[in-house]
Amino acid sequence: MRSPRDKVIITCAVTGNLTTPEQTPHLPITPAQIADACLYAADAGAAIVHIHVRDPLTGRPSMLLDHYVDVVERIRARNPALILNITTGPGGRFVPSKDDPKVAAEGTTLMAPEKRVEHIAALRPDICTLDLNTMNSGGEVVINTPANVRRMAKVIADAGVKPEIELFDSGDIALMRDLLADGSLQGPVLCSFVMGVRYGFQPSPETVLYARGLLPPDAEFTAVGIGKAAFTTVAQSYLAGGHVRIGLEDAVYLTRGQLATSNAEMVTKARRIVEDLGGAVATIEDSRRIVGLPSPTKTIKA
């Protein structure tokens, strides 16, 4: 059994890979908008910001290193202590052709593991995500084989970056334990339960408690709810002894029928939920200590 933590880290996932401008006009798109969203979220109480980048002209997801550099430089110039968590999720999606399913169709992003983490080696952020899921995702498939995950983990470790392990179902936790056992990952592990994505963990208090029970005792975890489960999962994660995450990557509504006007507004609500339940929000300094991060002395190498 775990009790609620004395200090709870808020992560803000500001734009993501799947939320579209059609869903909300408040989605940050350009590097300047993404950086501002991160900084305002920090002002509202987020100690960690989770970063994807987008093509400024189309709003579509991007993996261009220049966009990442632009975002990181803008944030570091104004808040060098803020904990940056950069995605490595893009590059794992496969869409089979209708007539020949072994041939990739439009929408496939599958690429070499080292290519998916080259921006991590260049930027050396505090944290980066590492997805362990191979699963149906909507009408498509996400592929993260154990061998490819190990290749990505090596690049991440060589860069001195702490991975946040993204867990979409219980089998991912079994893989994480194998990676810890063979040294591909080092504990204590930082991880997230992503709940509400078809067809993985479904959001509920029972899911959070079940997944928590499969973790190593020293693991730090966050339960993440997608869509209408976003804010209820903030409460569930806190009560289960975890940290919390919110942002326009995960949901676009602040309340039923009311679009969130900013990531900072969502962080403010998540902070209020934690504090109303009796918790305290971790500062950036607190969060670095909890996660095991050094002082922010790293520099961009790109």
Image (cartoon, rainbow, N blue to C red):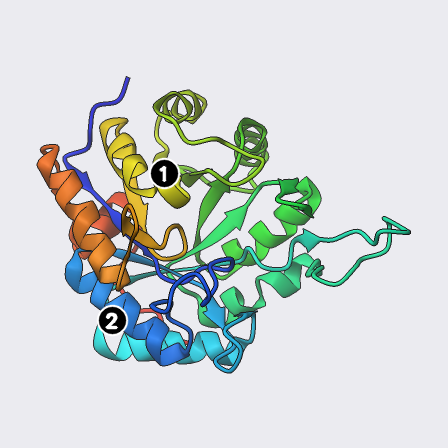
Q: Is residue 136 left or right of residue 298?
A: right
Q: Which residue is mark 2?
A: 80
Callout 2: SS: loop
Tell me: residue 239, above or below residue 192. Answer: above
Separation of residues labelled 1 and 2 (CA atoms): 32 Å
Tell me: residue 132, above or below residue 18. Answer: above
Determine which of the numbered discs, if any, sits on residue 298 in the image.
Answer: none
Q: Is residue 287 left or right of residue 211?
A: left
**Residue 165, horizontal then vertical, whole percent:** 47, 43
Badge count:
2
| Res. 134 visible in picture | no
Mark 2 surroundings: few (<14), some (14-19) or many (≥20) residues within 10 A: some
Q: Is residue 225 left or right of residue 241?
A: right
Tell me: residue 242, above or below residue 115. Answer: above
| Res. 131 visible in picture | yes
Q: Amino acid at mark 2?
A: Pro
Tell me: residue 183, above or below residue 174. Answer: below
Residue at 42% across / 37% down in the picture? 187
The N terminus: image quadrant: top left
Q: Quadrant of residue 276?
A: top left
Q: Which residue is mark 1?
A: 229
**Residue 243, horizontal then vertical, whole percent:** 28, 40
Q: Amino acid at mark 1?
A: Ala
183 or 277: nearer the viewer: 277
Residue at 37% across / 70% down in the picture? 28
280 or 109: nearer the viewer: 109
Residue extending farthest to the right is 100
Q: First in sequence: mark 1 or mark 2?
A: 2
Callout 1: SS: helix
Q: Is residue 81 left or right of residue 248?
A: left
